Structure formats: C-alpha cells, structure tokens
Amino acid sequence: MNQSQLVQLIKSKRSFLCVGLDSDIAKIPASLRQLDDPVFEFNKRIIDATLPYTIAYKPNLAFYEALGSKGLASLEKTIEYIRGLQDPVFTIADAKRGDIGNTATLYAKAFFERMNFDAVTVSPYMGMDSLEPFLSYKDKWTIVLALTSNAGSGDFQKLYTSGEKDSGQAGHKKLYEAVMEKSIQAAGSQGQLMFVVGATHGEMIKNVRAVAPGNFLLVPGVGAQGGSLSSVAENGLNEHCGLLVNASRSIIFASSGDDFEKAAAAEAARMQKEMEPLLRRKHIIE
C-alpha cells in the first residue's frame, strides 16, 4: 500500500486508527482457550468487529514468538485473513528489528516477502546500514523508532549530540532528532518511511514535525498508556493526515468476557468518532 492509497483509506473511513494485536493468550477469554488456535480466533473476531473503524492492524511479534511455532502459525494465519478481506487495510509487523548485513536482509525478507506485511518497525541503534535492507523494498514501509512512549525513552533518545563525528562540539540536537534526519536522508522519500513517536510526548510532536513535516508517524500510547489523542492531533496532523494512532489493550481487552468483540467494536468506534472532527478541522475530509 503506497502513500496515496493509505491517505485515501484514511479519508474513506474518516479514521487514522491502528489496532494493536497484542494478543496475550493469558488475557483472551477463557472460552477461546479450548480451541485449536485460540490466538487466531481471537484476532479474527477482533478484526471483524473493528474493521469499520480502523485502517491498520499491528501485531506485536513478542506475543506470537513467545508461543513458538504455534504462535508464528497464528500470526501468519492472521495476516492471510487480513489479506483476504474485501476492504483494504494496512498491516504493520511490530518487530523492532535492528541488525546489519545478511541478518537485516533476511528480517526484511521474512516480513515483506514471506508474511507480506506492508510495514515493519525497526531499531536504528546500529546505524543506517541496519535500515538499508528494509528501505530497499520500494513498495513497503520502514517504521523507525524515534521517540517512544515508554518511561525509559529519555535514557538515550533525548540526549544531546552534535550530530557530527568527532566534532568535539557541544550538543545541539537530541539523539532522536539526529536519527530522524539521518533516516530521511537514507530513505530519499517520505512515501516509505514512518517514525514511531509516543503519544505520551504530545507537546514534543511539534519538534518531531519540524524535523519530519511530511512523514507519517506511528503513535502508540493513546488509551491504556494515557496519551492524549487531541494533543497528538493538534501537534502532529499534516495536510495528508500523517498519523496512525495505535491503541492495543484499550480496544482488544476492553472486556475480558465473551462480549469482547462488542466491547472492542464500541471502543474502536468511540476513537473513530473522536478522530473524524479532528480530520475535518484540518480540511483533510469534508
């Protein structure tokens, strides 16, 4: 899915909601755990319930890898199910991979070719050569960790750096800003590069937009982590929306009972209704 198709999807659904499929088997309803593949069945029902309100799904790989081969089978079945839907939808592998050479090349092949995700999250800590294998897929999206929503994000991401090797000068920009600038230079196009920016940094999204005015941002932290959707939108929306706001636990575990589908749909619908006037205010939709 290219940028124009993604923007059209946002406009047609009047939403920039991404549902995180953090499908923890310990939290899904007990009635599903007796099935042969409870995780896939849970995902399928969540997808069916929330599809009218969301434009993207983002499985977090940890919840599947922890279950071994069965978990990875559930993940592949989930992606195959999404690909078989009549309505188009954007898919993100929340894998946070970060390595170089053949390793990065095979990670890219796994997510972009074998599983056919539209996008994958990557860690830039090892440098731009760790991103290049992902960026080489011109019809796919690379989502670079920039300013994350976790409590420890400031340990490294907000440290000042001169941005020049061995310059000996005092720092002038924060590390996350340097990462974004280098990534944009490496990508050469805003149409295949996103950045992860946590909703818990609502005011700092202004700084992010100064560095990356045209790129899409994947924004976790709204919902269970307490980030403000209105603050994110005020500081992060651009002329073609430029935001995918992710909610995971607040939607998929809105209920722990057998009414989980209904509860998930209600929460996704609530968020979509909150997003629609924000899009209208920026004249992205009429």
Image (cartoon, rainbow, N blue to C red):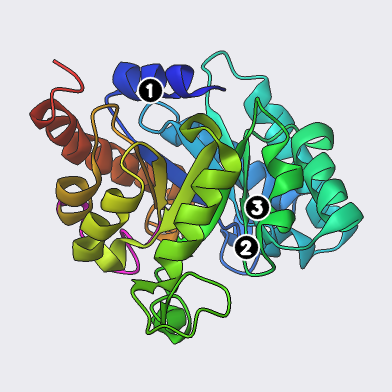
Give the image location of residue 126, x and y in percent: 69, 68
Residue type highlighted by circle 1: Val
Name the secondary structure under disc 3. Answer: helix
Q: Which numbered tag is attached to residue 247?
A: none
Q: Earlier in the sequence, mark 1 or mark 2?
A: 1
User: What residue is shown with label 2?
Assistant: 123
Residue type highlighted by circle 3: Leu
Measure the C-alpha gap from mark 2 to mark 3: 34 Å
Give the image location of residue 171, x and y in percent: 38, 80
User: What residue is shown with label 1?
Assistant: 7
User: Quick one: label 3, few (<14), some, or many (20+) residues within 10 Å?
Assistant: some
Give the image location of residue 127, x and y in percent: 66, 63
Q: Which of marks 1 and 3 is nearer the N terminus?
A: 1
Name which quarter of the figure residue 43 lies in: top right
| Residue 225 counted in the magenta span | yes
Which one is nearer the viewer's eye here, 101 or 152? 101
Labelled pair 1, 2 in contact (Cβ < 8 Å)? no
Residue type highlighted by circle 2: Ser
Single out the mark in the foreground, 1 or 2.
2
**Residue 60 horizontal side relative to residue 87, left or right:** right
Observer able to see residue 147: no
**Residue 158 horizontal side relative to residue 166, left or right:** left
Q: Which numbered tag is attached to residue 32?
A: 3
Q: In this view, does 141 lie above or below 198?
A: above
In the image, what residue occupies the spot 8% across and 30% down? 281
In the image, what residue occupies the spot 60% across and 19% down? 85
Name which quarter of the figure residue 81 lies in: top right
Q: Give the range drawn in magenta.
A: 220-230
Q: In this view, does 175 lie above or below 76?
A: below
